Image (cartoon, rainbow, N blue to C red):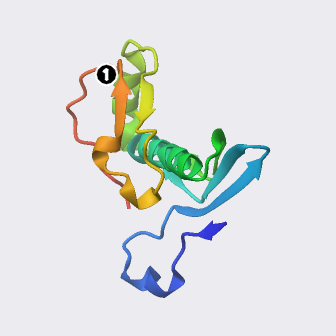
């Protein structure tokens, strides 16, 4: 179990951390994770949060000789800001693609040996979206 909140540093931050806790547990031979988050701007951060923690679970499982289990993401305040509604509408109207296949270098046994080249996505497809997304603070 981790606490991602460093109260000592809050006075230096423009925004308090949104993700605040990650709990890992093993059921049988599977590593499960629960990410707790106090607040999330769904357009700006959801994809980033889900992807980074899901990959982290894969990394931890692999170096621990475990299978990847469930990843549960609990968000207390999931929201879309008014200024983002036109962008969200554009994204919703885009065609959907099948999910890509996440690949991880299975030869890595030490967590600190992972590099950016240890990961790939096969059959990744995306729609064009070249708009800046304003982060609200």
Q: Position of residue 91 (x, y in %)?
A: 37, 24
Q: Quadrant of the N terminus?
A: bottom right
Q: Please tell me which residue lies in front, 53 or 5.
A: 53
Q: Is residue 132 left or right of residue 65?
A: left
Q: Position of 1 compared to 14: left or right?
A: right
Single out the residue that lies furthest toward the left.
130
x and y percent of residue 28 in the render? 79, 44
Q: Position of residue 85 (x, y in %)?
A: 40, 34
Residue with the most extreme right position: 28
Q: Is 82 in front, or is 114?
A: 114
Residue 86 visible in the picture = no
Q: Quick check: 130 above or below 127?
A: below
Which residue is pictured at 48% across the width and 51% down the height? 109
- Secondary structure beneath label 1: loop
Q: Residue at x 20, y 31 (%)?
A: 130
Viewer-closest of 1 and 82? 1
Badge 1, how many Cα within 10 Å: few under 14, some, many 20+?
few
Q: Is residue 71 visible?
A: yes
Q: Quadrant of residue 82?
A: top left
Q: Residue at x 36, y 16 (%)?
A: 94
Quadrant location of the C terminus in the rendered image: bottom left
Frontmost residue, 7 versus 136: 7
Q: Residue at x 40, y 30 (%)?
A: 88
**Residue at numbered disc 1:** 126
From the top left corner, tell me how far across and down residue 44 is, in percent. Answer: 38, 45
Q: Is residue 85 above or below residue 36?
A: above
């Amino acid at each position: 179990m981790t606490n991602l909140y460093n109260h000592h540093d809050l006075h230096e931050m423009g925004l308090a951390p949104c993700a605040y806790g990650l709990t890992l547990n093993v059921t049988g031979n599977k590593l499960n994770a629960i990410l707790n988050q106090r607040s999330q701007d769904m357009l700006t951060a959801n994809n980033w949060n889900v992807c980074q923690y899901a990959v982290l679970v894969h990394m931890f499982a692999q170096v621990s000789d475990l299978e990847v289990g469930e990843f549960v993401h609990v968000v207390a305040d999931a929201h879309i800001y008014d200024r983002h509604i036109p962008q969200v509408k554009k994204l919703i109207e885009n065609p959907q693609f099948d999910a890509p296949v996440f690949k991880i270098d299975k030869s890595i046994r030490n967590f600190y040996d992972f590099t950016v080249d240890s990961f790939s996505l096969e059959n990744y497809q995306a729609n064009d979206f070249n708009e800046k997304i304003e982060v609200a603070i």
